Image: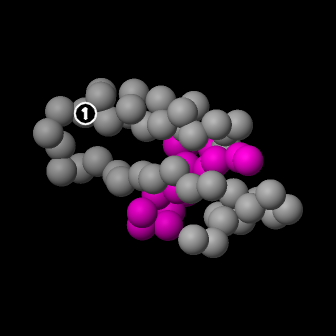
Amino acid sequence: MRYLIVRDDGCCDAIAGQQFGSYDEAYDVLERYYGDLCCSDEREYYRVVALADSVDQPAAR
């Protein structure tokens, strides 16, 4: 299974759109991003979603 980082607002940037072979790899990227910010309301919000095996679309829950 592959995992995709998406922005909660649906926009794409240098982080959103990256795909990973494991959830942990994707989480580590977000952990570094949020760790570099200090109490900022200017940050973007991201989440990791599992991709469907047959297509590069977020898997249904």
The spot of residue 53 in percent (x, y) is 80, 57
The residue at 53%/43% (across/down) is 15
Q: Is residue 39 left or right of residue 6?
A: left
Residue most toward the right? 54
Residue at image coords 71%, 46%: 2
Residue span colored magenta: 1-18
Total numbered badges shown on the rendered structure: 1
Residue type pointed to by label 1: Leu
Q: Which residue carries the number 1 mark?
A: 37
Location of the C terminus (image quadrant): bottom right
Which residue appears farthest toward the front when viewing the image? 61
Q: Nearer the viewer, residue 61 or 11?
A: 61
Query: Is any atom of residue 53 visible in this view?
Result: yes
Residue 31: image x %, image y %? 38, 32
Confirm whether residue 13 shows in the render: no
28 over 41 or under it: above or below: above
Task: Please rate how many residues cluster around mark 1, counting C-alpha atoms within 10 Å: few if below 14, some from 14 to 19, many from 20.
Answer: few
The residue that appears at 49% across and 67% down in the rendered structure is: 10
Residue at 63% across / 55% down in the picture?
50
Tell me: 29 left or right of 19: left
Name the image quarter holding residue 18: top right
**Residue at disc 1, secondary structure:** loop
Question: What secondary structure prevails in the magenta region?
Answer: loop
Whether the magenta-drawn stretch holds residue 49 is answered as no
- Left or right position of 35 against 20: left
Nearer to the camera, 28 or 33? 28
